[in-house]
Image (cartoon, helix red, strand yellow):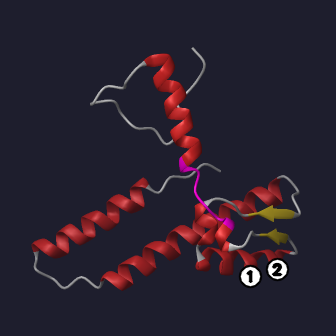
Amino acid sequence: MDFSFSGLKTAVLNHCNGARQKSELLKLADICASFQEAIVEVLVAKTLLAARKYNIGTIVLGGGVSANPRLRELMGESCRQEGKRLCIPRPSFCTDNAAMIALAGFHYFQKSGPGQYDQDVYSRSQLQEK
């Protein structure tokens, strides 16, 4: 049930660049709304797939993404349709994990020193005990 949005991001970037090269008008609000809807649909579908597969009755949204009104709305509708309980904190408690990532980076730096400028990025953490 892994997923990545890198292909979607690339497709949107290519669409925008192509439109600019042709001097076409970009309907930015429509592009953003479509991008959001595509991501929200995947998040909801994969979450409910996992809940069905593992017989989970309660779903909890957390992190910065859980502040997104459309995600909250669609997840709520979908959970009601499937008889799942949904727990979502108030938006003021839906923050990202930047502090945790910074702390992990700090500990990695202490153990390994600075990274290289050409060091690649990974969607899965490469941080591990050495």
Q: Quadrant of residue 41?
A: bottom right
- Foreground pick, 101 / 23: 101
Q: Quadrant of residue 91?
A: bottom right
> In the shown orientation, is residue 118 left or right of residue 45?
left
The answer to whether one can see residue 87 in this image is yes
- Tell me the magenta residue range: 93-98
- Dot 2 corresponds to which residue? 80
Label 2 packing within 10 angstroms: few (<14), some (14-19), many (20+):
few
Decide whether residue 46 is among the magenta residues: no
Q: Do the residues bearing badges 2 and 1 touch, measured as CB atoms within 8 Å?
A: yes
**In the visual, does 42 lie left or right of 117?**
right
Q: Residue at x 49, y 73 (%)?
A: 36
Q: Please tell me which residue is depicted at 26% across the width and 70% down the height of the picture.
A: 15
Q: Give the quadrant of the C terminus.
A: top right
Q: Is residue 82 above or below residue 27?
A: above
What kind of element bears circle 1? helix
Q: Residue at x 52, y 67 (%)?
A: 39
Residue indicated by mark 1 = 77
In the picture shown, does residue 61 fall above or below 124? below
> What residue type is disc 1 on?
Glu
In the image: residue 92, left or right of residue 102: right
Quarter of the view holding residue 129: top right
